[in-house]
Amino acid sequence: MAQLINGKEIADNFCRDIASKVKLVMCRGVFPKIAVLNAGDDPSSEIYIEKKVALAKSVGILSEVYKYSSNVSQEELASQIQKLNADASVHGILLQSPLPKGLVFRELVNLIRPDKDVDGLTTINQGRLFSGEPGIVPCTPLGVLHLIYYVHKSIAGLHAVVLGRSSIVGRPLSQLLLNANCTVTLLHSYSKNLPEICKTADILVSAIGSPRFVEQSFVKPGATIIDVGISRIEENGGKKTVGDVDFEEVFPIAGAITPVPNGVGPMTVAYLMDNVLQLACC
């Protein structure tokens, strides 16, 4: 039976450390601050931003949200990003996704100064990661790595399989694992023999957003399973939040596993705060 990796508890402990460091930085006259740009009326974005603002407040980080309607222009958002780039009181800038139809996320995010790119999504910061140079790393991959190290003192030589190749999770996480001397296999929608390959993994991370896709047949007994996916499904006449992994099936044979919710999610927001702190200390 698997060890349950309680991401909420681990994130709470990590945030207490962040709060202590924020106090030390403030004693030196630096007040870490994040600016969030939110365009449109996506309900999930509103919830995520509320959580980010609440956590920022709890650890002593200042925050400001810039709310725009769904008919905001690319030029208006670009202008606001440039203003924030020039504002010395702002250490981190976050462009909330998804954006309304017609706006180009990649173009806008690349306008953010790399030293204010709190999400690590600019081409420059992602290039630094893949080149092995220091820079800001996307928050979810950092949170995943933290949870993996909660189970393993060392992951050098282990085989890690990552399901999903997004620039937010799959690709940067694969690079982080490579940097930690894992053997890494990155799988995606065109990959063949998924269950057979996944079953060779000592560490299996799924970030594809497909409910209960990973079944027992995908899992090597004793493997560490990190479930990044989150979906809302209809079940027994109501709504239920589930991950990419069929938790009930996999739990009996895994060595360790994250739940959904309260697995990777809290770690993602915690590392957003940590990235703000790192940028404030630059």
Image (cartoon, helix red, strand yellow):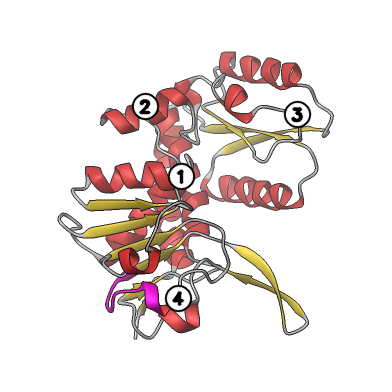
Q: Amino acid at mark 4?
A: Glu
Magenta residue span: 217-224
Quarter holding the C terminus?
A: top left
Tag of residue 215: 4
Tag of residue 231: none
Q: Amino acid at mark 2?
A: Gly
On the image, the x and y values in percent for residue 114 come to 46, 22
Q: Amino acid at mark 3?
A: Gly
The structure residue drawn at horizontal position 50% and vertical position 76%, both measured from the top left corner, is 246
On the image, the x and y values in percent for residue 135 come to 35, 29
Label whose residue precedes the other's in the sequence (1 or 2):
2
In the displayed structure, 148 sits above or below 83; it is: below
Secondary structure mostly seen in the magenta stretch: loop
Q: Is residue 281 visible?
A: no
Residue for badge 1:
139
Q: Toward the viewer: 93 or 244?
A: 244
SS under mark 2: helix
Q: Is residue 54 magenta?
A: no
Label 1 or label 3, whichever lies nearer to me, is 3
Q: Is residue 90 visible?
A: yes
**Does the CB distance between marks 1 and 2 fall below 8 Å?**
no
Quarter holding the N terminus?
A: bottom left
Q: Quadrant of residue 236?
A: bottom right
On the image, the x and y values in percent for residue 54 come to 63, 50
- Classify mark 1: residues with Cα within 10 Å, few (<14), some (14-19) or many (20+): many
Q: Is residue 60 left or right of residue 151?
A: right
The structure residue drawn at horizontal position 41% and vertical position 63%, both measured from the top left corner, is 10
SS under mark 3: loop
Residue for badge 3:
102
